[in-house]
Image: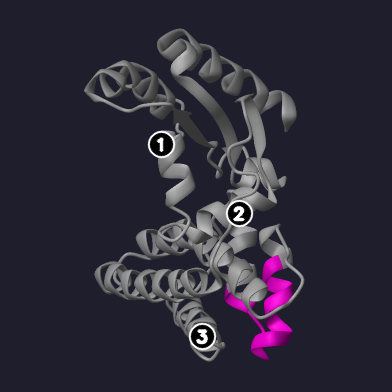
Amino acid sequence: MTNKIDEPLAKLVMRLKEAFGDRLVSVILYGSAAIGDWHEHSSDLNVVCVLNRLSPKELAQSEPIFRWWREQRNPPPLLLTEEEVRTSTDCFPIEFHDMQEHRRVLHGSDVIAGLQIDRSFYRAQVEHDLRAKQIRLRQRGAEALANSDALLNLMIDSVSTFCVLGRHALMLSGTEPRWKKTEVVAALEPVLDKRLKAFNEILAIRASGKRNTQIDTLSLFEAYLEETEALVRFVDALDR
């Protein structure tokens, strides 16, 4: 894995350094690649880029770099100032919590070390994001019920996010965190008191990249909705 991600990351850092010079404070890799759960055909390279200031000039200089990065099938880097990093943990506690646990400093200083995250904001974001993703899953599922390929793609595209939120639900409950998606699902089963067969099947399809034409996508989607609902109920019952 390392060889496949190191080259594009090195090119990204080089372009950022050339564009911003001493205005570039830090470049940090986070997400699945930092955790060790990155898959070439289904995972992104998530990067936060920290500058000492952000004006229209910096935005204009970032545009060709970010466009190139998107062409590599990665999301655009998060572009923040040092001050925004220090003052945004209440708005993005999940993201900063993950960065604190697993990150790789590609350039500059480690601006994530030492950040304090308030549990009340953290728990609220986990429940908010879970409910929002669940509502979105139902909405898009209703539009795709007649198209088995679209319905399966919806499940594959959404399962990673539910696993991330499941990991944070485990941490909020005091359970030892797991970082690989299959390990998160295995750890969730005893705390939810429920087998997560749909989660496991969707993750297996996602990892293999192979679509079995014999899959009953409607039944799989029904089970997936039940399992995500169990996760929402679990977080809702946690102490505030």
- Nearer-N-terminus badge (2/1): 1
Give the vertical position of 212 relative to 32 (above or below): below
Residue position for label 3: 240
Label 2 to label 1, Cα distance in Å?
17 Å
Residue 80's mark?
1
Main SS of residues in magenta: helix
193 or 65: nearer the viewer: 65
Q: Nearer the viewer, mark 3 or mark 2?
A: 3
Relative placement, left or right, of 113 versus 125 is right
In the rendered structure, which amino acid carries the disc numbered 1? Answer: Leu
Q: Position of residue 44 (x, y in %)?
A: 53, 40
In the rendered structure, which amino acid carries the disc numbered 2? Answer: Asp
- Assign the N terminus to one quadrant of the image: top right
Q: Position of residue 130 (x, y in %)?
A: 44, 73
Q: Is residue 139 magenta?
A: no
Label 1: element kind: strand
Q: How many marks?
A: 3
| Residue 79 seen in render | no
Q: Position of residue 35 (x, y in %)?
A: 69, 47
Q: Residue at x 64, y 50 (%)?
A: 100
- Nearer-N-terminus badge (1/3): 1
Density class for disc 2 (Cα within 10 Å; few <14, some 14-19, many ≥20) is some
Q: Which residues fall within the magenta stretch? A: 184-198
Residue position for label 2: 98
Label 3 to label 2, Cα distance in Å?
20 Å
Q: Position of residue 171 (x, y in %)?
A: 66, 72
| Residue 48 seen in render | yes
Q: Residue at x 59, y 51 (%)?
A: 115
Relative placement, left or right, of 214 versus 144 is right
Residue 14's mark?
none
35 or 83: nearer the viewer: 83
